Amino acid sequence: MSDRLSVFKTYKLYVGGKFPRSESGRVYEVTDSKGKWLANAPQASRKDARDAVVAARKAFGGWSGATAYNRGQILYRIAEMLEGRKDQFVREVADAEGLSKSKAAAVVDAAIDRWVWYAGWTDKIAQVVGGANPVAGPYFNLSSPEPTGVVTVLAPQESSFLGLISVVAPVIATGNTVIVIASENSPLPALSLGEVLATSDLPGGVVNVLSGKTAEIAAPLAAHQDVNAIDLAGADEVLAKDLEIAAADNLKRVLRPQPVDYTETPGTERLTAFLETKTVWHPTGSLGVGGSSY
Amino acid sequence: MPGVYSCYARRYARLVTMPTNAPTAHALGDVTASDSTLRRFLHGLPGVDAVGLEARAASLGTRSIKTTAKAYAIDLAISMVDLTTLEGADTPGKVRALGAKAVRPDPTDRTSPSTAAVCVYPDMVATAKEAVAGSSVKVASVATAFPAGRAALDVKLADVRDAVAAGADEIDMVIDRGAFLAGKYMKVYDEIVAVKEASGAARLKVIFETGELSTYDNIRRASWLGMLAGADFIKTSTGKVAVNATPANTLLMLEAVRDFREQTGIQVGVKPAGGIRTSKDAVKFLVIVNETAGEDWLDNHWFRFGASSLLNDLLMQRQKLATGRYSGPDYVTVD
């Protein structure tokens, strides 16, 4: 006989490497695809969003300054941790998206592979989109990609795990820090991802996970002067338009929502969407009287 | 004297320290007559209920200040900031920039008030004076071998005279914590009196370095000692040690100035310094001022914040209230 009491999990936000409840104290009910109650998720407020921006800004210096190689290692470490907790994610994805266990397992496998794929890109993207430019003068002219800064990501509403990873991994791979708003109806895989990130050498604040009403959290973030870019993947047409208008005031980079099949191998678009190109002119060296350097 | 303070036994459990039959100003004049009377007076002050003090400070910190009240509080806090730079690496350029910021904290918004003062080392006073010329911003100078205060009295007084000669409107002195902790209260008293005299017309702020005084009782004694010696302001800390201004020690000092005015009619200002970085903290302090000392102290003539990064946070909050959107560090100056 088993009369053991069930241990319910309190899902929490992931902000600045910590797991706070919503500042507002609110939660909302999360159900599976058939309407059965799964858990209560925190319903983040605009103050949680503001705190997440502070955390992301604080983490930006260290993360963008880390070597691309080191970032790749850390991302790969996250994939290792995901692998170890695969069963949990399979269960959560199956519940959230109404998939059979085997189909959910395939989605989680694809998500982990996607993470590894982006981990590989960290120290290669600079060679692809940067380079030495030919100029007529005694200068080296070099272009190199640099991270945009603090990026807000509205995670896809339908694909709660593969879609989430497909939008978060490319943003942090290039050195940005991110505030991700989880799928409104299926936030549990995203909140559990926070627990994986917390144990994967990823510095606190590089990824911040908020759950709640997407429109409510996204509005202050789109208007926030200290957010440099916003990815509207999880916004419907009306919300996307409002957020784009709000984002215009401090000239945020905006990635508009587009139909994406997250099961396909992506290109580099999501990597390059949040990169700025820095070009420097560097003298080749002082020229001697004879016209040669040194 | 013990008779005068016997009432404290009954009131000890409460934090409020106002004695019912307060000694007259004349009685307070007597306490500094000799080392022993001063010691008896300071040790006769009621002990501080540490738990009650901290609980009171914490409960005052939970007040919700929103919308118009918040806007008022932020502007008041900006006008109370002593914008401070006390680094070995201070350059004339940095002090000039600080002066410009003190005069016009937010160049994009002409309605933002100026800060109360800039606070610099004595050798930077002339530069600072020039930078704030023609404005309401005062120049405060730390002196007396700041921050340790470990120098001969002559050296300390020369330091003060230098600063005053260079045009300082306010002098921030440090007490000799070594002498205070050793119980040589008269030495500390005499030193403050001497510095007060050397300061001339400049207002004197006396820094106790509360983080080095170990106990709340000592902070209360130091507060009274400083006020008896003629301080215009009592100030928590230098900002150079681990523990700086806290709500609790500021509350304690506010009680001291309130009680001192009750007994002598002399109003003394309070300046918490160090560790106050956010608008939220600043507003908490203002609530404590209002609830402890009263509205008379809600003015930059009687209450100041010794701070540097606080101003940026106040400005960002001010921008948020004005525009409705959260601001960021890109929109305020880097000091």
Image (spheres, helix red, strand yellow):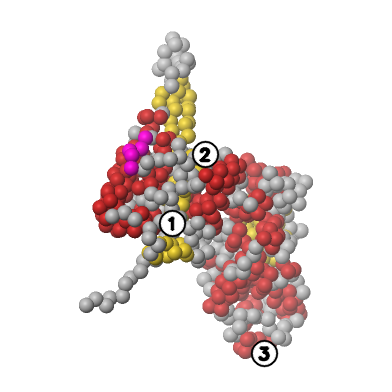
Residue B332 visible in image: yes
Kind of element beneath mark 3: helix
Labels 3 and 1 within one chain: no
Q: Are marks 3 and 2 in contact (CB under 8 Å)?
A: no
Label 3 crowding class (10 Å Cα cut-off): few <14, some 14-19, many 20+? few
Task: Estimate the x, y position of residue B98 in percent, counting from the top left.
Answer: 64, 46
Labels 2 and 1 within one chain: yes
Label 2 crowding class (10 Å Cα cut-off): few <14, some 14-19, many 20+? some
Labels 3 and 2 within one chain: no
The residue identified by callout 2 is: A253
Camera-nearest residue between A58 and B255: A58
Q: Residue at x 44, y 11 (%)?
A: A291
Amino acid at the residue labelled 3:
Gly
Task: Estimate the x, y position of residue B278 in percent, counting from the top left.
Answer: 58, 58
Q: Residue at x 73, y 74 (%)?
A: B261
**Marks 3 and 2: which is nearer the front?**
2
Q: Residue at x 61, y 71 (%)?
A: B60
Judging from the image, mark 3 belongs to the subunit labelled B
Separation of residues labelled 3 and 2 (CA atoms): 74 Å
Amino acid at the residue labelled 1:
Asn
Q: Does B287 sit above or below residue A255? A: below
The residue identified by callout 1 is: A185
* Start-end of magenta stretch: A263-267
Judging from the image, mark 2 belongs to the subunit labelled A
Quadrant location of the N terminus of chain B? bottom right
N-term mark: 2 or 1: 1
Q: Is residue B104 left or right of residue B52?
A: right
Task: Estimate the x, y position of residue B288 in percent, counting from the top left.
Answer: 64, 69
Kind of element beneath mark 2: strand
**Marks 3 and 1: which is nearer the front?**
1
The residue identified by callout 3 is: B3
